[in-house]
Every structure is written in structure tokens, then in C-alpha cells.
Image (cartoon, coloured by chain):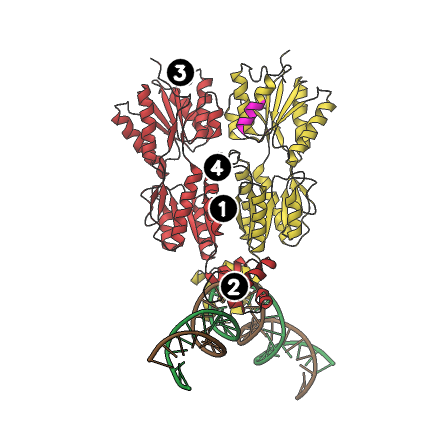
Chain colours: A yellow, B red, C brown, D green
Amino acid sequence: MDIARRAGVSKGAVSMALNGLPGVSEATRSRILEVARELDWHPNNAARALSAARSDAIGLVLARPARTLGVEPFFFQLISGLQAELSGRRIALLLQVVADHEAEIAVYRQWWSERRVDAVLLIDLRVEDTRVTLLEELGLPALVIGGPGHHGRLPSVWADDARAMTQIVDHLAGLGHRRIARVAGLPDLLHTERRTEAFRAAAAARGLDEPRIVWTDYSGEQGAAATRGLLGSPQPPTAIVYDNDVMAVAGVAVATELGVPVPAALSVVAWDDSPLCQLLHPPLTALTRDTFAFGATAARSLLAVLDGGEGADMEDHVPVLVHRESTSAPPP
Amino acid sequence: MDIARRAGVSKGAVSMALNGLPGVSEATRSRILEVARELDWHPNNAARALSAARSDAIGLVLARPARTLGVEPFFFQLISGLQAELSGRRIALLLQVVADHEAEIAVYRQWWSERRVDAVLLIDLRVEDTRVTLLEELGLPALVIGGPGHHGRLPSVWADDARAMTQIVDHLAGLGHRRIARVAGLPDLLHTERRTEAFRAAAAARGLDEPRIVWTDYSGEQGAAATRGLLGSPQPPTAIVYDNDVMAVAGVAVATELGVPVPAALSVVAWDDSPLCQLLHPPLTALTRDTFAFGATAARSLLAVLDGGEGADMEDHVPVLVHRESTSAPPP
DNA sequence: CGATGTGGCTGAACCGGTTTAGCTGCTGCG
DNA sequence: CGCAGCAGCTAAACCGGTTCAGCCACATCG
């Protein structure tokens, strides 16, 4: 190490000085720091990783069909939030987009066996999630985004989907709706199930008709098809809650096309707000969550895990329903 | 290395065997491979990186305001395409989302000084791009996505925006439009300028009126505002070309709101297709490009650079205009 | 004044691979 | 038969850091 030579000390001393460890005098430390600055020295990541048995990287695998990905701002906002916390600690984010569950698991195995990452983030938790048991078996530290429950001994961060859903149903019921329906996302995702339970429970609590639910893959196509089905049925709903913004937009388009005015004949609520919701005509009543902040929270939890902490489970803020013009009282 | 012990050879022999290098007999090689399989052995990435002076990772920095990011499927499709090529070579992708240009440059410096990446992808090329000179100075291998031109000695992969734009203008002129306008993206991006030049040139070649152009930040808000401005002017255009799908959607919403029927009174073309374009009412005529394939092409080019090749500049396929229902003959 | 710490530093081992010089035993050739 | 040449392997250096045992000089204390 040529800093050592230039400063006339051993490389052990340099290491202590640069890492703020005791073992060198203040005079020597500042001399070494000075030399390091002069030489614009930066530690070689591989060397540090090898010796410390750390990689200073965390991994995120996205396993959704490419088609539905990227349509939603959710992921980028999450990633931005994550990095707001991680980059301060010089921790990198490895991103991998894969086609399916199998491939996702293969990536975890490889990353961990090669020690490419120190931990991973698990997203889109399923009801029976083989990934959780895999990660536990591997001993690969992980933070589950989504919960509570079904995440084994892994720590988890989540938002209270149930309370959010209750908010929505209350809002609609308060406007006078009695026949509400829901266009849901993928049925095997845990949060879809959570929302479904809460949806049914809230409807029952308010004495509404047994609500209809249609499951989709989050794509606009399926959202449109579901809407068409609901509106074409004998007793069409007077309000529909969509599990994402893209489907809500598609739903409004279908309704308009069928001559069903929004909100006069049909109220629409979108789960997850986006610029799109505000641009549409009418602007959509939507459930807003601060995904950036959520990502930052998740990152802090993950760092706690990496620091050897237990990684306590944590609940994020409850999402807020923003009232816009796509919801109103049902037709008489 | 305990494979060596188990197989009764030296670790040097193990290394040769596992990497397919000459120097071991076939018998020994297969015995070593067998032991490695039994032990489910995988090389430690840090050790390999340290010794080979490679990191087996490439970096991608996205420096757009978080608000406009993620709205476009473009990035995820690009990333998916990149990884389709990269993961076969066990090369990871480091993703960093930053706020601005300064931060982006800082990330490059850090990544390279710590040898975290072997190369980076440069995206959203600007007319005067300080990043190009920085990367050249640093000696950090890079592939520029966007061009041709303005990328110094760095290799580049691009799509022919000019020909695509000509296609669009030809289509509109063929329908009979004479007053067309364009809602463009960020003015300092190179491809924005490319499109602008081509737009003006094609309009002139077809003898159309001098076209109006409004620049935006790609957000739906600004797209809506631009549309409002254009339609409210004394001589409103009969066709508008938008630089992305989100703005096109916003534009249609504004037109509808103002009582300007699409396509009867206003034709709309979106640059970049997405499910959204097909869902809208009317479905939008849009410029489709195979972003996944583009990403794969870029990855191959980048691999060529890493393999020590010159990294030849390459042009991707010309995007194709898909005719849907948002374009028709102008009102008489 | 000698025993005992102790702050400050050095030298070497170590992380887990790759690479290379060099050794061994065999084959083939004159 | 003697020697060159080569296949096949080992041992050790190396990548660039971190960590730790141990050494030295000096202060402190009984």
C-alpha cells in the first residue's frame, strides 16, 4: 500500500487511521489522512469485502411479468427511498428482474453462495411463500416488505392495508353506496388477500350487499375486462375499488365507452396514487402512500438487521385516501 | 480450500479444473468437478474480484426527478433486456437512482475508485455532456445509450430517432394535416434535439406550416399545460406529437375537457407505446420500439467493450409507428 | 531503582481465489 | 542409454485490504 510508504508507516497503521480505530496517535492519523487525500485514495471494494466477509451490497429481485412492471411508479419510488438511506452507508443495490418464482429463487441461491450480497429484500409476499423458508434455510439475511404474518422468522415492514381498505369502504358507504365491487390484483399475493378480507369485513360491518371481487394480474387489459364484466351484469355495482392505478384508469375508460358516466353512475377509487390519477378526467379518488418514505423505513430496518440487530417488525404509516372527483353519491 | 483437500490435490489444480484451463488431466478434472458439485461449491465473488481485478458488475445511474421516473415502462424494459444478456455471464447490475447530475458524477467517481463496477451505462445523453469527458478521463469503460455523436470516444448504441420522427410527420401529412405541433421532453437531452431537428426538417420537406414546439419535463402536468396552451392559441394545431405516452394521455384528457374531440378535431401521436396507449379511449397511435431488445443489444455491446474490444457503435432497429384511432384526417 | 503498565506502532497472518515458476516422472527420439 | 520435452501437478506469490500478537519506549508506581 503506497500510502503507507508515503507516510512512512506500516499498512496496519494506515488501516487503523483511515477507519477511525484506536491504535495510532492523532498526529500520525492526520498525517495519514492527509496523504490519502493527496493521493485521492479509495479502498478497493473487493479487498475489503474479502477480508471483512461482507459485500456491502443488498439485493432486490423483481419477479413480475415485465409487462406489468414499470407501469407502476411504486418500484422506482421504493428504490429511491431505499437508496436515500443505503448510499450514506456505502451500500450498493443489486437489482435483478426475472421472469418467475423459480428464477427468483435461483438468484438468491447464487447471490448468497457467491456472497454477492449481504442481505435481500423480499417483495410481493405470498400466502404460502417458499422464498421465506428458502431464505431461512440459507441463512441469507432478509427483510420482508409486506406482512404482518407469513414471513416466518424474517423481519418485516408493512403498511396497514386493512385499515386503508376500511377507509375506502367507509368513504363509499358514507356517500350512500350499497353495491360496491373490487377489481383486485394477483390472488396469491398476501396483501391482495389482506385487502379482500378487510373489504368483505368492512362491507359487512356497514351492512352493505355482499361485495363482488374479480382478480386480475394488475394489467390494464384485465382491469378493463373485469370492469366490462361487472358493468354488464344484471345488478352492476355503483362503485368499484381498483387495486392499482392502471386498472382504475382502464376501468374509467371502459365505463365511459359503455356510456356509464363517472362519477354520476359509477364511483371509482384507485389504490396507489400517481400523477396519472390526477390527470385523468375526472381526476381519481386514490389511496396515497408515501412510497419513498416507506423505502427509507425499509432500508433502516434492513441496516438494523445487518448490524446484527434482531430486525424488529415495523408498521409504516397508514395510507391516506385523497378525495377527488371520481367518487360521489350513487344514482338514486 | 477444502475442495482441494477432499480431492487430494492442490488449490491451484482446483482452480484450473473449475475454470476449464489446461494443466490438469481429464481424470483429475472430473474428480474435482464431482467434489465441487457434492459440496455445492461456488466461488467467492470478492476473492475472485480481488485477484482478477474485476468486479463482474456494471452500473446504471438514473438521474431524473423521481416524479417522472417510473411512470415510463421504458427503464424496466431496458433493464430486463440488459439482464437477459448479462446474467448469463454472471454479471450483476448495480442500480442507483440520484437526484441530479452532480450526484450522478459523484457516483461514477466512487464506483470506479472503489472498483465496484467494471463499466457503466450512460443514459439520457445531453448535448454538452460533462459525463462523457469525466468517464473518458477516469478511464471507466462505458457504453452510451443514445447518439450518434456527442459521445466522445465512448461507444454508443442508438435508435434512429430522426427516421422515426419522419415516419410520424409523413403519416400526419398524409392524412392531410398542415398545422402540427410537438410537445417535447427536456430540451437539453440530445434525443430531444435530434427529434426536434427531424421534426422541423420533415415538416419543411412536406411543405407544412412552421411547426410549434413546446418543451416539458416529461411529466403529465406539463404535458397537460402545454396542450392547453396549444389548443387555446389563435391557430390551434390539428395534430400534436408527444414525446412520451404519459403526456399524450394527459393531452387527450385536456382536449376532451376543452371539447376538442380526438381524433375528429385533433390527432394525437405518442412517442413510446405502452399498455396505457391501447387502453385509452381512443387508443393512441404510438411509436413502438422494442426496448427489451434494445437493452439486450446494449448489453452485448457492453460485453464486447469489457472483453477488450473496441466497442463498435451500433444502430438499433428503427421504431415502428402503430396506427390506432387517435389519428385521422383533420377537420375540413 | 526495578516492576508494571500502556500508548503507538510493526510485521505477519489471513480472507479465497488466480497465476506462475518450477518440480517430477514419463515418453520419445537420436 | 542419455537427454530433451512435455503433461500434470505443487508450492508460493499475489490481489489489497483488516486484524492481531508482539515489541519498544516511555510513564507510573511502590
Would you say B36 lies left or right of B186 here? right
Q: Amino acid at mark 2?
A: Arg
State yes or no: discs 2 and 3 in contact (Cβ < 8 Å): no
Q: Amino acid at mark 3?
A: Ala
Which residue is disc 2 drawn over?
B29
The answer to whether marks 1 and 2 sit on the same chain is yes
Name which residue lies at 54% across and 21% down: A252
In primary-sequence order, the first of circles 2 and 4 is 2
Distance in Å between CA atoms under marks 3 and 1: 44 Å
Q: Mark 2 — on which chain does it sit?
A: B
Residue B317, position as x, y percentages in the image: 36, 37
Q: Nearer the N terminus, badge 1 or badge 2?
A: 2
> Mark 1 = which residue?
B96
Q: Which numbered mark, 3 or 1, is in the foreground of this view?
A: 3
Q: Chain of mark 3?
A: B
Tag 1: residue type? Gln
For the N terminus of chain B, the quadrant is bottom right
